[in-house]
Image (spheres, rainbow, N blue to C red):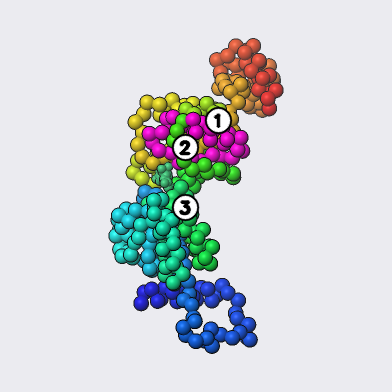
Amino acid sequence: MENDKWKMTNQLLLHLLLPPAPATCTCLLHLPPATILPMPGTLYVVATPIGNLADITHRAVQVLTNVDLIACEDTRHTRKLLQHFGIDTKTLSYHEHNEKQRTEELIQLLEQGSDVAIVSDAGTPAISDPGFRLVRAAIEKGVSVVPVPGASALITALVATGLPTDEFFFAGFLPSRPVARQTRLRELAAIPATLIFYEAPHRLAGTLKDAYNILGEREAVVARELTKLHEELRRGRLSELAGHYANEDVRGEIVLVVDRTVIDEGAATSKEELKVAAMVDRFEEEGLDHRAALKKAARELGLSRAAAYRQLLAERSRS
Ligand code: SAM
């Protein structure tokens, strides 16, 4: 009964979306019943939380409750999520080792009119997770595919890094073997966008070291255990992060985000140098002449007047 209601809602929606049939349309009702094909079902690609169960959406719960079947990466894992929300829909395993065979079975069910949801262990299916093959096959067979959005670790991390979000490149997992990883990092080095990687904790130190050597010094963020109890976002330069994690027994799930810009290490590095011009400007605005403003800035920064003057010239020449 629930399912019928659900199907009716879908049909109503379809009705609203489709233009009305022309008046001359000869209806399916004129065909003998045996030739009427069942309405194909719908494949829902449903995102689930990446840690905090409260991050599930109302719509995800609704869809998971009402579909005929849920294809999951790990049925035991997804059962816990379903139990938490009081959902008792049938589940079927769909993972990298049975993806090909299961795709055929699921497409058959969809073609016979069943509604199927696909979920992964966490986050959005098909993002570094199974799902792509099924979505592709469904499209080829004319089955409608409906995304049900929600959490994904890459976006959750990116928006909290403070690194530019206007253009970003998601590189998934880097190869685990060092030589292949270094080759991939060389390919990515020239991309003018924030780089996002998924990484396993035991590989983080090696990846940070390679990233520093190959991408150069850049701002980066290690986002760990997002939305969970021990959530941590550690920001720093690649060299600092590589140093920090070199001897750390790091645990949990990790997203590494790297800025597009290589830091020019030849540029001003001393704090005093960065401050001289701003200070001189301020003192001049307050009424001191240039000479007196420079003298006061030098005193406040603990510099000789000659050093302050040199730094002022260097700073002005860069601006
Ligand atoms: N499909 C998922 C998504 O949309 O985010 C990603 C699945 S992928 C197999 C799992 C990887 O995502 C982890 O190894 C980690 O790099 C990242 N990840 C997942 N959950 C995370 C979390 N709570 N905090 C940080 N990274 C996470």
Magenta stretch: includes residue 182: yes
- Locate residue 29, reporting x and y percent: 52, 86
Which residue is at the front of the view, 33 or 68? 33
Q: Which residues are magenta?
A: 179-207
Closest to the camera, between mark 1 and mark 2, is 2
Q: Which mark is residue 215?
A: 1
Q: Nearer the viewer, residue 290 or 48?
A: 48
To which residue does mark 3 refer? 126
| Label 2, residues with CA under 10 Å away: few <14, some 14-19, many ≥20 | some
Mark 3, ligand 1, within 8 Å: the answer is: yes
In the rendered structure, which amino acid carries the disc numbered 2?
A: Pro
State the CA–CA distance, disc 3 to disc 1. 28 Å
Picture quarter with the N terminus: bottom left
Callout 2: helix, strand or loop? loop
Mark number displayed over residue 184? none
> Is the residue 199 above or below the residue 282 in the image?
below
Residue 246: name its quadrant: top left
* Residue density around tag 1, few if under 14, some if 14–19, many if 20 or more, within 10 Å: many
Tell me whether the residue at label 1 lies in contact with that at label 2, contact meaning CB atoms closer than 8 angstroms. Answer: no
Query: Which residue shows up at 49% across the image and 33% down it?
Result: 181
- State whether residue 89 is above or below residue 216: below
Q: Earlier in the sequence, mark 2 or mark 3?
A: 3
Q: Which residue is mark 2?
A: 175
Mark 1 residue CB less than 8 A from any atom of ligand 1: no
Question: Which corner quadrant of the image does residue 259 belong to?
Answer: top right
